[in-house]
Image: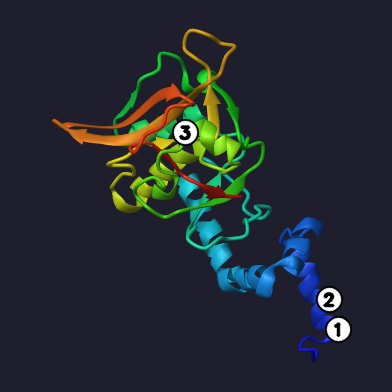
Amino acid sequence: MSRTLSVHKEHEFLLAMEKAGLNDALAQKVIASKSNEIAQQFIALGHDQAELILFEWQQFWEKLGIKIDITGIRIPIKKNGFDRLLVIPGNITTKKVLEFCKSFFTCWFYIAKNINSIIATNARENVVTYAIWVHDRVESDKELIGMSANDLRMKKIATMTVLERLIFELKYYQETGHHLDLENPTICSGSRCFRETDDVIFDRVIHIHWRDRWQDESLVIDNFSETEHGNHYRAREIVW
């Protein structure tokens, strides 16, 4: 294959990729991907588009009084169909995001305790600011219909946490004035919760949807068993 980059430009390119977060593990994925699929994704997304998306998120959070540094955020490799990027600020609490939601629309929280205190574990902890790709759709993922939180864990499918789902709701509402999950709740299976009556066992998951009936419009936040499943309960897969 003929060389298309000079040695100097090749060196500059590698330095830029390293600065952008290309580590050894990710480089190996690029090398091993069939038909240069991952390399093509880097080109398809583009540096300028990535910067624009991150800047938009920075502006969104600053309007809410939250400052984030976008320079060190790693954008995950995008998968087909996952077209919306969510940026989760480091150390922001689920309770804080719920308060933001309450400042724009009514929220019904059918759990007696503070939402922070009942969440026992998260698949991703926001010690630092991070980004995830999700399906850009109103309803939760039809591909995951009938799967309980336990099923998703057994199949190792990465799905939204409670924090991520609330941030998606907040951003979508700010953009459109509308809401997510009008027909089917999202199972936030990326998080596990304590039972209200027991602070040791955590076998509950929170599900979230928008209720619009009988002049009672609100974001409903409830919980059930991690083994619960049905056609109306679906998670949202993420890429990170």
Residue 119 vs residue 237, the one in the foreground: 237
- Residue 11, numbered circle: 2
Per the image, label 3 sits on a secondary structure element best described as loop
Q: Which callout, 3 or 1, points at the residue further toward the start of the chain?
A: 1
Q: Quadrant of residue 157?
A: top right
List x then y, in percent, for residue 89: 57, 42
Asked whether the residues under the numbered discs 2 and 1 touch, taking CB atoms below 8 Å apart as contact, a structural biologist would say yes
List x then y, in percent, for residue 58: 53, 51
Residue labelled with disc 1: 7
In percent of the image, x 52 and y 22: which residue is there?
A: 116
Disc 2 marks which amino acid? His
In percent of the image, x 78 and y 58: which residue is there?
A: 23
Q: Residues within 10 Å of mark 1 (few under 14, many from 20)?
A: few
Residue labelled with disc 3: 148
Asked whether the residues under the numbered discs 3 and 2 touch, taking CB atoms below 8 Å apart as contact, a structural biologist would say no
In percent of the image, x 42 and y 55: which residue is there?
A: 136
Per the model, the C-alpha gap separating discs 3 and 1 is 53 Å
